[in-house]
Amino acid sequence: MGYVGSSVKRVEDPRFIQGKASYVGNIIMPGMVHLAIKRSPYAHAKIKKINTKKAKALPGVVAVFTGQDLLDGGCGPLPCGWNVPDIKTPTRYALTVDKARHVGDGVAVVVAEDPYIAADAVELIDVSYQPLDVVIDARKTTELEAPLVHDDISENTSYEWALGDKAVCDKAFEEADHIVELDLTNQRLIPNAMEPRACVAQWTDTTEEMIVWTASQNPQLIRLLLSAYTLLIPEHRLRVISPDVGGGFGSKIFHYPEEVITPWVSRAVNRPAKWVATRSEASITDSQGRDHITVARMALKKDGEITGLHVSTWANMGAYLSTLAPLIPTALYITLLAGLYRMKGIWGEMWGTLTNTVPVDAYRGAGRPEASYLLERLVDIAAHELSIDPVEIRVKNFIGKDEFPYQTPLAFEYDSGDYHALFEKATSLADYAKMRTDQTDARDNGRLVGIGISGCIEASGPAPSAVAGSLGFALGLWESGVVRVHPTGKVTVLTGSHSHGQGHETTFAQIVADELGVPMTDIEVVHGDSGRIPFGMGTYGSRSASVGGSALVKSAEKIRAKLIKIAAHQLEAAEEDMVYDRAEGKVYVKGSPDKSKPFAELAFASYTAHNLPEGLDPGLEEISFYDPANFTFPNSAHIVQIEIDPETGEVELQRYVAVDDVGNVINPMIVEGQIQGGIAQGVGQALWEQGVYDESGQLLTGSLMEYALPRAASFPKFEIGRIETPSPHNPLGVKGAGEMGTIASTVAVANAVMDALAPLNIRHLDMPLTPDKIWSAMQKVGEAKTAKVEYFGGE
Amino acid sequence: MTMPVSITVNGTETSHEVEPRLLLVHYLRDVIGLTGTNVGCDTSQCGSCTVLIDGLAVKSCTVLAVQGDGSDITTIEGLAKNGELHPIQQAFWDNHGLQCGFCTPGMIITATEILKKNKKATEQDVRHGLEGNICRCTGYENIVKSIVAAQSVAPAKKAGKAKKGTA
């Protein structure tokens, strides 16, 4: 039918643009109670006593429960699902019992007739705390005198992990002509999906069945964890639904305390229960992102050949290990340190440490932006120090297009790519040579114009299940897909993936329409309801098209094979002589197109079962579980121009050029939208966003008044291009598209700002590159306007 | 203590006894069940809850329901008329102006005011006009594109309606 590859308008849009979406927070049920959670105002404190008497006495309050009540009521601790070797996993309860370990740690829950009363009653709970010393820094927390976040985890170190060949790395540094050293902080971020998390639960006493609606990226995973670990209601009595979900960016992957508390309360009071986070509450309870302290060194030859990289990172895990937290700074970070380059001598080591801060887990890019940031900052500094153009030094070190599949020294085998073509396209789209000439002119006039380059790799579409298991995952990372053809030829597609803005109802329909030769309007895509879909893994790591889409391709292939059997039987021809015409949606005899059976007629025949080949089951429904053979490896070249106002230090983003290779593209409009949104989030980290804790562990950026999210006027029009090197590992040839923009844009913008400041001999500033930080650095080095230096060795 | 309020919402008069502290957005969502208007923050930053009060775009989390007494409110549910999308809704659909959709009702309502105040809004006008609305998904590019494009959708639709005598 030719849907794949075209910018089909999204079929899900009409409900969103008319206010008819079904977010969890929209659910209203008769008899529903509303929950509000009493949270610790201290980052670290012993809970001595909780007095709930006044709260319980408030009219409209139905009940108040503490952590001990949940424990006595059978709730289990929240598990961590990614267990690297020798990991020490702290115990985490939905409501803490012994002590609070971060501001926002829940200690009690109020159940009331309406949310206003619940909020009032929370204020009436009297908790007696004994404040304890606090630790917030990922590296200092490992010092011997630091207070322990969990008494049973010494030096606050939950795990350590390393990868690479240390001997090759050491040799590279011994033989280096030039070594670049950089200490950096990759700051804490707060994901801030626009829909705050929400959970609704309905217990039915008569049938002992629970339905949980939760704003999650993977309802089946949540059902499994609720069933096996936290709530202990068996899976066949527990249905978990994630309807329309308003963005996630990773933060809605994880199993959260409120997903335990809400259904537990619903059962305890035998009424439907609802909890909706406020934004301020989300700031202190949603898993946060990044937060690395890193010491890095790069070894080079004097011609710019990169030969070695040595990285030591302290990754802040927060107060507990969130569901997938140990994955992020290990197998999604150190494994990516080779970037687009051929270098062999890489050693990466890291420590996952506990602090009195909100737990940290995957946030858009998840480990890969941290890897790209340090690598591409080092390459840029090296280019500057060796007087080589930053594009030239990158191109010199690229893996060649004929070297794929390419085995890196860090376990990954890159699938496909053409980094030279990628950069040629980007520099041509940007007119890079002219950008540099214009920059020189601008500098001559005392203007602080900077050009930033990034070339980044991503591992997306996780992952072969056996590999995931060997790296620490407690589950698999395949995906399921059902193609159910109804008797009239209409099609229902069930996927274990989940859309929270990515447009799967459109792209998956495009795929199946082309596979079967039916119009998209005849296809509906169902996701997010464990009562309707098969077990599946949900959406994260830019995996839905490559893993979820591939499962659907497999199921569609099985449907075609069955229809060929039926058509061959009815047309009295040999199966091998049948042709499935995907353009027309019919099966015909080779050489005799008039001897054919249309799709709908064959579908109906499969259900009447009056005339089927012997031994063939009636019906037309196929399921597949697709386990990917490898990750996919999208890559990107981004080129940015910024200008700094010397009076204020403010950065103006003037041009943003992005060329990405995400393999084959199913819907260019949707992919471009993903890239654009990804860029904006990454730029947010470079310039404005930071989750700031003070020394007592208070989050100073706990609302949108303090946490600076990008706005519409923050950006110029993006200039976007792409090249396509199909991934050979999946039938669609696609790679992930959801995170590349974020991975590449943060460091491209940071490099641009540092390029602008290079004439002032400011070598590196940590993000976010706020006006205050830039202005202060400029004051230190003196007058900006008179500075002028030769840069990158001239022409 | 409760107080009576009467508010016309999308052309329908509604009357309820409400607590004086009830926010207008909660009146719309929880009392009369119009959940198209979303709540994305608690500091009036995100603009997800924007509605038109007597024709002006207002963040409905900054207004008490009792302050809305006697007013005429349009929410996202009230924009499409007779089954026909408002030109701005159509433009958001045509230009991929949304991803997760959560900020979209506020964006579309705000856009009606931007385009009402400025008959020839440029890309920059729109970007600045959206200063009170946050989107985390799109990077704003296609939202801006949608709103600029809606200006060329609007006259055609109005003309079409005028011919039918319904303008």
Image (spheres, helix red, strand yellow):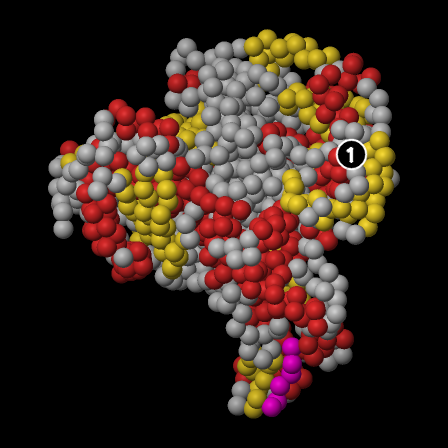
Question: Which residue does the numbered mark 1 point to in the structure image?
Answer: B66
The crowding category of the residue bearing disc 1, from other C-alpha atoms within 10 Å (few below 14, some 14 to 19, many at least 20), is many
Question: Which secondary structure type mostly characterizes the magenta part of the structure?
Answer: strand
Direction from residue A388 to residue A711 in the image, left or right: right
Residue drawn at the location 70% of the way across and 55% of the way down = B79
The stretch in magenta equals A594-599
Residue drawn at the location 56% of the way across and 10% of the way down = A131
The image quadrant that residue A195 belongs to is top right
Q: Which element carries disc 1, helix, strand or loop?
A: helix
Q: Give residue B93's position: percent from left, percent from top.
A: 59, 60
Q: How many marks?
A: 1
Q: Give residue B167's position: percent from left, percent from top.
A: 72, 65
Direction from residue A515 to residue A19 in the image, left or right: right
Residue A151 can be seen, yes or no: yes
Q: Is residue B154 above or below residue A285?
A: below
Residue A450 shown in magenta: no
Residue A549 can be seen, yes or no: no
Residue drawn at the location 56% of the way across and 41% of the way down = B132
Q: Is residue A791 above or below residue A415?
A: above
Q: Give residue A529's position: percent from left, percent from top.
A: 68, 50
Q: Chain of mark 1?
A: B
Screen quadrant of the N terminus of chain A:
bottom right
Q: Is residue A315 above or below residue B90?
A: above
Residue drawn at the location 46% of the way across and 16% of the way down = A695
The amino acid beneath tag 1 is: Val
Q: Give residue A746's position: percent from left, percent from top.
A: 38, 41
